[in-house]
Image: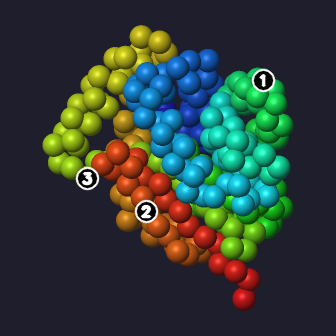
């Protein structure tokens, strides 16, 4: 599995392999996220929801929504907004639908790729993606799509893993990510999926470099917020007003 996913020479093969991997781990996805992060991932998602001022938004697109954690948290803050959760794994969306129905959240759910969003220009005033952008094969195309579907003055929020800023913590982080996490994950799901996680984080651009990618895609006012000593980073950026 990992060999297919990390093969840089066949984008479509990588895309299918990543999609298949997430579909296979979907039933255990929430449990493993809580276990492997010691619950910290929930706090990071709550920070995203708080900092985007969700209650002021009327139309929200949550890309790579998975089982719907961020979408549902956004719903709590924006009870009257249109909220669309999008993911390329139908298995993930099936679980998101169950959670949405139980909560009476009324989420719209769409199965599609971040690189080819099935929406019109200027349709949303907030686009969010949590722990998903590193799994996108063509990030440049995805960022262009986020920009396209955002309204002028709309906001993009990207939450992603990053390398800790504190050296000693970075050493512990790498031991946990590359050695311990695959062993624990392998007890409950495919070990290859949890080897892929640290490898995908290691390949993801550093925060300043990714901020440059946001600016290159047309976004302005790019801000970085390091979370838990830089283990994760929240990126906020805005689409300019129409001139």
- Determine which quarter of the picture holds residue 154: bottom right
Q: Kindly identify which numbered label has been placed on residue 187.
A: none
Q: Nearer the viewer, residue 135 or 224?
A: 224
For the C terminus, the quadrant is: bottom right
Please give the name of the residue rendered at 65% of the width and 72% of the height, measured from the top-left corner. Answer: 239
The answer to whether residue 222 is above or below residue 6 is below
Most distant residue in the bottom direction: 243
The answer to whether residue 144 is above or below residue 226 is below
Most distant residue in the top direction: 187
x, y (%) of residue 192? 43, 23
Residue 8 can be seen, yes or no: no
Please give the name of the residue rendered at 48% of the width and 39% of the height, measured from the top-left corner. Answer: 43
Question: In the image, 175: left or right of 236?
Answer: left
x, y (%) of residue 12? 61, 42
The secondary element bearing badge 1 is classed as helix
Q: To which residue does mark 1 refer?
A: 102
Label 2, residues with CA under 10 Å away: few <14, some 14-19, many ≥20: some
The answer to whether residue 213 is above or below residue 134 is below
Label 1, residues with CA under 10 Å away: few <14, some 14-19, many ≥20: few
The secondary element bearing badge 2 is classed as strand
Question: Label 1 vs label 3: CA separation?
Answer: 40 Å
Question: In the image, 241: left or right of 1?
Answer: right
Mark earlier in primary sequence (2, 3):
3
Please give the name of the residue rendered at 64% of the width and 64% of the height, measured from the top-left corner. Answer: 155
The secondary element bearing badge 3 is classed as loop
Point out the frontmost of discs 2 and 1. 1
Mark earlier in primary sequence (1, 3):
1
Q: To which residue does mark 2 refer?
A: 224
- Determine which quarter of the picture holds residue 88: top right
């Amino acid at each position: 599995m990992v060999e297919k996913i990390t093969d840089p020479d066949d984008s479509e093969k990588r895309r299918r392999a990543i999609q298949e991997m997430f579909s296979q781990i979907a039933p255990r996805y929430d449990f493993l996220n809580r276990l492997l992060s010691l619950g910290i991932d929930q706090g990071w998602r709550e920070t995203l929801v708080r900092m985007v001022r969700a209650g002021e938004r009327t139309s929200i697109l949550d890309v790579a929504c998975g089982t719907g954690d961020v979408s549902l948290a956004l719903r709590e803050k924006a009870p009257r907004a249109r909220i669309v959760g999008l993911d390329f794994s139908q298995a993930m969306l099936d679980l998101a639908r169950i959670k949405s129905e139980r909560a009476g959240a009324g989420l719209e759910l769409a199965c599609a790729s971040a690189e080819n969003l099935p929406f019109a220009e200027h349709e949303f005033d907030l686009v969010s993606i949590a722990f998903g952008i590193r799994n996108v094969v063509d990030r440049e195309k995805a960022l262009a799509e986020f920009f396209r579907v955002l309204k002028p003055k709309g906001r993009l929020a990207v939450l992603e893993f990053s390398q800790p800023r504190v050296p000693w913590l970075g050493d512990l982080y790498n031991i946990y990510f590359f050695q311990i996490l695959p062993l624990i994950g392998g007890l409950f799901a495919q070990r290859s999926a949890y080897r892929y996680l640290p490898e995908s984080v290691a390949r993801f651009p550093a925060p300043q470099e990714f901020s440059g990618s946001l600016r290159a895609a047309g976004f302005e006012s790019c801000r970085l917020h390091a979370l838990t000593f830089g283990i994760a980073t929240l990126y906020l950026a805005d689409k300019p007003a129409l001139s």
